[in-house]
Image (cartoon, rainbow, N blue to C red):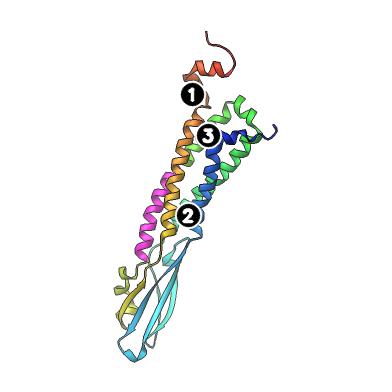
Amino acid sequence: MDQMDTNILKEPRGFLRVLQFVFAICAFATTTNFGSSFSFLVKCKNETMGTTKITQNIEYPFRFDHIIVEEKACGNSYTFSYFGDYSSDAEFFVAAGVLAMLYSLASLGFYCFFGGNYQTNKTFPLVDFLITMVIAVFWLSGSAAWASGVSAVKYVSDPNSWIKTMEICMKNGDCTAVFAGNFAGLNISIIFGFLNFFLWTVNLWFLYKETSWFQQDNPASAAGAGGVSPI
């Protein structure tokens, strides 16, 4: 193991890894820690029974069809659930974020403690380049899928989309939407997702310059780096 060298953090390859670590946490944290709710009122045909307000929390992993609601309204008991399971989109996005966070942290440690091996053994730059490419693809596909998932979550969380078909509403009279949820946090998570894709894609160029592919295409640069003047 070499002595710790933090100078790599001043270079694009290391500095971008720090940004990737921070923004990966921001991306999946805004998703897993998201919390909001939607609510609607059940107005009884018999006005003497008043109204019942039903509120449902919205949280990760967004399995609405797994929610079983037991509610009393207008003198009757009702059991119902909502529709839609968007956990696959959310969990894939979070998995991409966790993978990116762990790899950026591990690669930073390798840069700092094994920088000499990274420069002399050309296998390490190739592996680093390929893994970075895979994670960039994960960010693109995960962010696109999650953007679609968030749109679906917004639809399900708007009571106006489905209250007319609910048994509790059809049997008792009129239902009115009160609140459809606040999704600023999920919108920000999508922005973080595409920002991460940009960071990992940009980093590919700096990693490519460390690989033997780039040095074979630029023999003069490789010779100069090795201290031998080209003939």
Query: What's the residue type where badge 2 is placed?
Result: Glu
The one nearer the camera, 51 or 195, is 195
Q: Secondary structure at mark 3?
A: helix
Residue appearing at x 50%, y 53% in the figure: 28
Number of other residues with Cα within 10 Å of mark 3, as a class: few under 14, some 14 to 19, many 20 or more: some
| Residue 54 at x, y percent in the picture | 41, 77
Residue identified by numbered label 1: 214
Instruction: Tell how many labels.
Output: 3
**In this picture, is 193 found above or below 175?**
above
Q: Which residues are magenta?
A: 137-156
Residue linked to disc 2: 91
* Marks 2 and 3 close (CB-CB < 8 Å): no
Q: Please, what is the three-letter code of the amino acid marked with disc 1?
A: Phe
Which is nearer the N-term, disc 2 or disc 1?
2
Q: Closer to the camera: disc 1 or disc 3?
A: 3
Alpha-carbon neighbours of circle 2 within 10 Å: few (<14), some, or many (≥20)?
some
As for residue 153 lying within the magenta part, the answer is: yes
Relative to 56, say whether 194 is above or below: above
Q: Residue furthest front?
A: 10
Residue behind mark 3: 12
Q: Nearer the viewer, residue 149 or 193?
A: 193
Residue 72, quarter of the rendered image: bottom left
Screen quadrant of the N terminus: top right
- Residue at far bottom of view: 48
